[in-house]
Amino acid sequence: MFFFEQTFLTVLNGVSGAFGPMAAITNIANAILLLCALFAVYEAYARGGDARMIGIAAAKFLLLGLILSNYDSIFRSVNGAFNQVAAAISPNDWASNWMLQVSQYFNGLGNASWFNLVISSIVALISVLVQLIAAVIFPISLLIFTILYCLYGAILYAIGPLVLALYPAFGVGQLARSYVVNLFIFQAWGIVYALFSVLLTAINANSLAAMLASDSLGGWFQGASTTLLMSLASILFAVMVALIPLLARRIVTGEIGSSMMTIIHTVGTAVGSFKNVSFNSKG
């Protein structure tokens, strides 16, 4: 299980705990469900006593009643199923592994090496700044991604009963359908993350040692210095993490082509701008 998924489970346990708001939310949702079912029956009666509409409303009421009574276990089962799919695609947490490798690389430099680099020359100082970029940008992007993942999931979990309770009512059921779409988008974050891990493993970009030995990132950035190569890789990985929510939404809604063009344009712009800044600084 990936780090952000474990963090979300901790948040989920807090929201659904004994002191959480889910008991009150579920009671309100049950009342809303009953009112919506009665309104649907009244609306069917107002349209001439349509037996088909009454049967549909009764079926929706029964189905949603079962879901609300077992909402916590159903939500956890759905989330666990998607997590298992992501783990089957890639059992390794590539982002955590990359952060560990970068940390070990910096620890290998030692404090004395850092101090000597800072006081030796302006070029060395720029090199230190480039290494700091590699050490800061990616962890921050991963932290923001984890916070957004937990917040998105907690909101979906908390408002789920209230939104689903509106489904039996004619005219407002679209809210429940939109909720289901957003639920699948949220669950797709982990799958896209796992697919990125497979991609990086395929081009041998998930290992810092292998990257530095080949002097390239999957054949890219040939001839770059060690610090520049590591920084470019970290920035590229940070962009990949930042694009996961957008890509997941586009995949679920069926907008694949425009998503790929967005990723290519964003990554190309970010990497190109950073390379220009780095080479201009060296010049």
Image (spheres, helix red, strand yellow):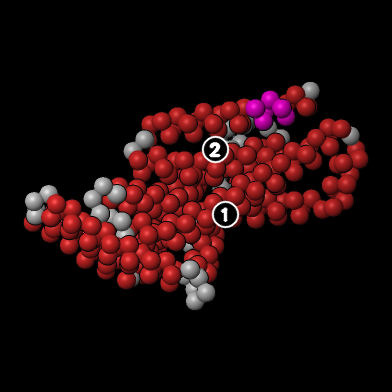
Q: Measured from the top left, where is residue 261 in percent x and y?
A: 45, 29
The structure residue drawn at horizontal position 52% and vertical position 57%, both measured from the top left corner, is 150
Q: Which range of residues does the magenta coloring cover?
A: 273-278
Q: Which of pointers 2 and 1 lies earlier in the amino acid sequence?
A: 1
Tell me, yes or no, whether the two marked residues, 2 and 1, touch with CB atoms within 8 Å.
no
- Position of 95 with respect to 190 (left or right) is right
Q: Quadrant of residue 49?
A: bottom left
SS at badge 1: helix
Asked if 174 appears above or below 62 in the picture, the reply is: above
Asked if 84 appears above or below 19 in the picture, the reply is: above
The structure residue drawn at horizontal position 23% and vertical position 50%, both measured from the top left corner, is 170
Disc 2 residue crowd, few under 14, some 14–19, many 20+, Cα 10 Å: some
Q: Nearer the viewer, residue 155 or 96?
A: 155
Q: Label 2 amino acid?
A: Gly
Q: Nearer the viewer, residue 141 or 120?
A: 141
Q: Measured from the top left, where is residue 91 in percent x and y?
A: 46, 58
Q: Measured from the top left, where is residue 195 in percent x and y?
A: 44, 47
Q: Which residue is mark 2?
A: 218
Disc 1 residue crowd, few under 14, some 14–19, many 20+, Cα 10 Å: some
83 within the magenta span: no
| Residue 147 circle label | 1
